[in-house]
Image (cartoon, rainbow, N blue to C red):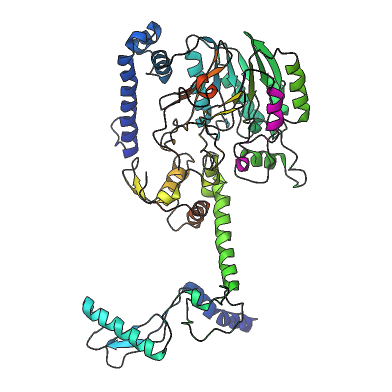
Amino acid sequence: MGYRFRSIETKWMEEREDALNELVKLPRRNFVRVATAAAGAVLAKGLLPPHSFQLIEVANAATVDTPAVKFTIAYISDTHIYTTDLNDRFVRSALKAVDDVNRLDPQPDFVLFGGDLAQLGKPAELQLGLQVLKEVKAPLKMMVGEHDWYLDMGETWKGLFGSPNYSFDHKGVHFVVLNSVIEKDFWTARKMTPEQRMQTVAGLDNSVQSRFEVGEPQRMWMQQDLAKVDRKTPIVVFSHSPLYKYYRPWNFWTEDADEVQAILKPHQTVTVIHGHTHQVLSNRIGNISFHGLLSTAWPWPYAPEGLPKLTVQMSRPNPFDMHDGVGDGRIDILTEGLVNKIYNLWDRNPVSVPASYLKSNGTKDKPAAPTFSSY
Amino acid sequence: MRNVSILSIIAMSPLVLWAADAVTQHDAPGTTNGNVVVALCDGKTSVEVKGLKPGETMDPPDAQRVADELMLAWTKKNPGVAWSMAPEARKDEKGKLPTPGAKTPEKTQFEAYGNYSSRDEFLWNREYEKFVAEGNRIFHDAKAFGGTVGISCDMCHPNAANTHAETYPKYQVQLQRVALLRDMINWCIENPSKGKPLHDDDTRLRAMEAYIMSQRKGVAMTPGKH
């Protein structure tokens, strides 16, 4: 293959790779004093490709006056796995994320999977997803997405991963995991097959499906669960849909978001971490901070309206680079219970959205503006 | 039986010919002494250019003289009428087009362009919407445009978002050439969707282009924008 004519695209990708490598070297020189010995040694030996994970930790240590990190969670989300006979791209991306997470040193306390493991909810897709996630070294917390659910209404998913909603405590923080992709029945009246129902929910821009909701039974459960928790205890909610109202036509939306927020309101420190939107997304409503998760499969465009004011957009992804605009990341839980959110964009500099930025309503520690904004 | 089929072929043949050549053509009258005859777009007025034989071209000043002559001839035939192709001339005081079957007002140009009713508008719009709907369908169905890995356009571009059709043509840095929107549609078909690029004439490509443009309705054209 080496002697073959190289296309313009290949050359362009190579140049880009070189440029990115240079970029990684630059902050290393600047911040060499604060580079951890471990990261430095790893890079010098060339054991790993120069990786953005090291860079952000170095840069953070040098530039942001960070409050103490109590513990760290890593995340992988929205892998949208197809079986490999059709398409192995999304599986490979999921494996790449697993490698990233396993490479973190120190290891995260646990790894959140943010939902949409499968693309069309097929048992074979979910089982393949389970195999991929079994490689994760740290404990795994699962969350369900609509792509996992609407072929068999969650039957396979529940068989593999258990209940879609649950809560747990970890180092003084109370975590609540929701199934927030419940939709009112739109399929029976239309006489849809399970496959048609799944395909409909899998698309964003159709008006056929209903909007996501948490639903009353689950809100009741949540209320009872939180009644036992001290109001000063930090709360972190994992939800696939955003738990606020961003853009209804694409279901970047939770129909009963107001009711859910009302349940969370009495608690002093609340953070919602959500999947589904495949983009860097930040919001704050009252006492609640919201952070989106990156997908490993593909980025979504920002919606034409309704984008929260506090969101500093990620750069418009380069379609010629399948690893642009996607990735994984980290959630650093601070001692005060708030969250620094790190978006590990695979082929760009990582983006960090510090707790102080959202808490100050955008007046402090604003993330850098994107190089290319969306149209 | 045999007679019937021959008759039906004869009966249909003008229709077939018409369909094959749907663009309206004006036949200029013949020439008496081998000179070129130039016709005006009203389909009626024409001028014979003395000394110009078929295959020869005119200098711009001569061509301008011929154009002026044609216009003069038309004005003489239509005294007091303004030259207007626009349907505006046919609208009533309330700005509405005439209803189907209404008599064409005399004081207009009345030929190919201006002579249509609200029913025509309705039908044209319906054709446009059908074409856009077909593009919408293909855009959402990987198999419909020949994708082989289950990746359809809407997976990354709901409502054709981030296709920024209004910025094409532009220099596409990654391709190192000026690209049209259809080049980018084909790029996506070929790369993420692992299909074969569609021919420029392919109805599927044309329909998808129509759908994408329809989604950017009202956005200012900014060709060349990065």
The residue that appears at 44% across and 58% down in the rendered structure is B201
Say if B78 sits above or below B183 in the image: below
Please tell me which residue is depicted at 40% across the width and 7% down the height of the picture. Answer: A38
Residue A218, by quadrant, is top right
Quarter holding the C terminus of chain A is top left
Residue B83 in the image: above or below residue A190 = below
In the depicted structure, whether residue A344 falls above or below residue B71: above
Based on the picture, tell me whether residue A362 belongs to the magenta stretch: no
Image x and y of residue A311, in percent: 51, 31
Q: Magenta residues, as a range?
A: A246-272
Image coords of residue B130 (percent x, y): 58, 60
Foreground pick, B16 / A347: A347
Q: Position of residue A253 (x, y in %)?
A: 63, 36
Query: On the rendered structure, is B178 left or right of A190?
Result: left
| Residue A269 on the magenta segment | yes
Which residue does the image show at 63% across and 31% down from the upper left?
A: A241
Q: Is residue A161 left or right of residue A355?
A: right
Q: Nearer the viewer, residue B18 or A274?
A: A274
